[in-house]
Image (cartoon, grey):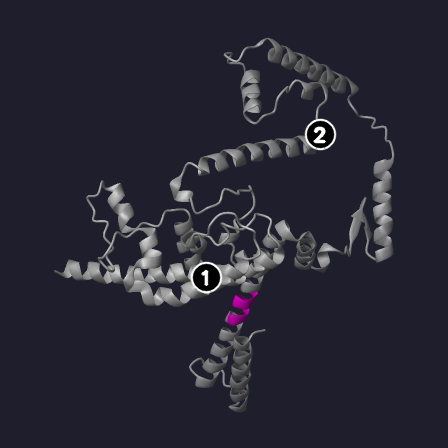
């Protein structure tokens, strides 16, 4: 319970006490009844918001713990499920109800004991079973034959399947006809092969895109990039995350980008200071119009960055632009928990704040300039 909720509780109690002292009026237009209703509504609204925020934070903790701390992950899952996820109050086996702890255990014993017994089902169709086994054998023989004699230029469905398997580095698929995998094994095997193929493919293509130069090529399917993680539901923090994502993926449009896209029909000059081309280096580090915004944050970023990077034995020089846009660029994929917390809690917020503040200043100046030009 936060201070805002405590204050709302006091206001509600005070309003209820005054309403009670006034004889509990029930007229719809009564001031004291309205005040009691409003304070009750405000309190419930704050409680619902707090519960929603707690759910969001819990889900984010579960997502973070799933990849870093399995013990915490299962602890959070058990907590989220509550008592009903651990205890059974009632069990029904063969139309018989078991309610106490001992009787529930008895019901489980009876149920699984019956499953272990071999039963002779009188109405079982043995002829149908034999027919299915014969059809299965025929299908296996046809599959083996098609895979052996058909060429890659054939339009056979089996050859299409063989091409798909070859794409994902699944060779000699005939062996799986003789020694088939279980459903779970096959699913795990295929998922691993497909993920590896696309992971390698994406990493290879990433190197060919200059706009992704601020992203290191470490990529794991199903794992959120640490730069995109946030535990806050604050709308401003979400906006900061959006701006940072545009910078790191090279999709933030500056005047130099507009000039390049239009074959330099657009002037690449910075519209804030009108002293140099508006490149990403100029916008973040050199523009004089935003120097007051930049100076204090740059000092803090350099201080935090030096504390973090001092622990890593780096062979390459540090680029300040890259550090600001993606603080994780120079860190290993599997970093220790202390470094990850230090970067996520101190360095990343400073970098997000700098980029968002520069973006907001640029947006305000350009909006005013465009409005003034339209009036003329």
Residue 232 seen from this side: no
Mark yes or no: residue 335 visible. yes
- Residue at 47% x, 82% y is 35
Q: Is residue 184 above or below residue 354?
A: above
Local secondary structure at mark 2: loop
| Residue under the point 79% across and 51% down | 91
Q: Quadrant of residue 125?
A: top right
Q: Position of residue 267 (x, y in %)?
A: 20, 49
Q: Looking at the picture, tell me which residue is in the foreground, 57 or 93.
A: 57
Label 1, on which residue?
Answer: 302
Crowding near pointer 1: few (<14 within 10 Å), some, many (20+)?
Answer: some
Q: Residue at x 28, y 52 (%)?
A: 278
| Relative height, residue 143 to residue 184 (above, below) | above
| Residue ID at (32%, 58%) | 286
| Residue 330 numbered mark, or none | none
Residue 110, percent from left and from top: 86, 44
Q: Which residues are magenta?
A: 46-51
Q: Is residue 78 left or right of residue 34?
A: right
Q: Position of residue 223 (x, y in %)?
A: 56, 46
Q: Provide the secondary structure element on which disc 1 rests.
A: helix
Task: From the viewer's side, name the closer residue of 344 and 107.
Answer: 344
Going from N to C along the chain, the mark reached first, 2 or 1, is 2
Residue lying at the far bottom in this picture: please name it.
21
Q: Which residue is mark 2?
A: 182
- Say few, some or many: other residues with alpha carbon within 10 Å of mark 2 (under 14 / 14 to 19 / 20 or more): few
């Amino acid at each position: 319970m936060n201070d805002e909720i405590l204050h709302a509780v006091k206001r509600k109690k005070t309003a209820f006490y005054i309403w009670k002292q006034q004889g509990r009026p029930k007229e719809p237009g009564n001031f004291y009844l309205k005040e009691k209703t409003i304070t009750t509504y405000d309190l419930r609204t704050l409680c619902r918001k707090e519960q929603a925020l707690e759910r969001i934070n819990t889900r984010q903790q579960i997502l973070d713990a799933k990849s870093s701390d399995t013990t915490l992950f299962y602890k959070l899952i058990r907590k989220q499920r509550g008592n009903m996820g651990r205890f059974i109050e009632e069990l029904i086996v063969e139309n018989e109800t078991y309610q106490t702890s001992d009787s529930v255990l008895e019901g489980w014993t009876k149920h699984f004991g019956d499953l272990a017994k071999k039963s002779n089902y009188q109405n079982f169709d043995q002829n149908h079973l034999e027919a299915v086994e014969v059809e299965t054998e025929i299908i296996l023989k046809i599959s083996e034959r098609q895979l052996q004699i058909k060429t890659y230029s054939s339009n056979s469905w089996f050859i299409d399947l063989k091409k798909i398997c070859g794409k994902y580095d699944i060779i000699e698929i005939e062996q799986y006809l003789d020694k088939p995998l279980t459903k779970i094994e096959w699913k795990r095997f295929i998922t691993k092969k497909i993920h590896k193929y696309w992971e390698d493919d994406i990493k290879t293509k990433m190197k060919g895109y200059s706009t992704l130069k601020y992203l290191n090529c470490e990529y794991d399917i199903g794992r959120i990039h640490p730069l995109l993680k946030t535990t806050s539901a604050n709308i401003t923090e979400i906006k900061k995350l959006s701006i940072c994502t545009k910078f790191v993926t090279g999709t933030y449009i500056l005047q130099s980008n507009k000039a390049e896209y239009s074959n330099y029909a657009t002037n690449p000059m910075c519209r804030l200071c009108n002293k140099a081309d508006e490149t990403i280096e100029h916008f973040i580090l050199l523009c004089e119009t935003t120097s007051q915004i930049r100076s204090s944050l740059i000092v803090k970023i350099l201080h935090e960055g030096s504390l973090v990077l001092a622990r890593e034995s780096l062979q390459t020089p540090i680029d300040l632009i890259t550090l600001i846009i993606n603080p994780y660029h120079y860190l290993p994929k599997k970093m220790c928990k202390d470094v990850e917390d230090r970067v996520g809690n101190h360095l990343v917020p400073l970098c997000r704040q700098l980029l968002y503040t520069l973006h907001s200043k640029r947006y305000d100046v350009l909006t005013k300039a465009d409005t003034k030009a339209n009036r003329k």
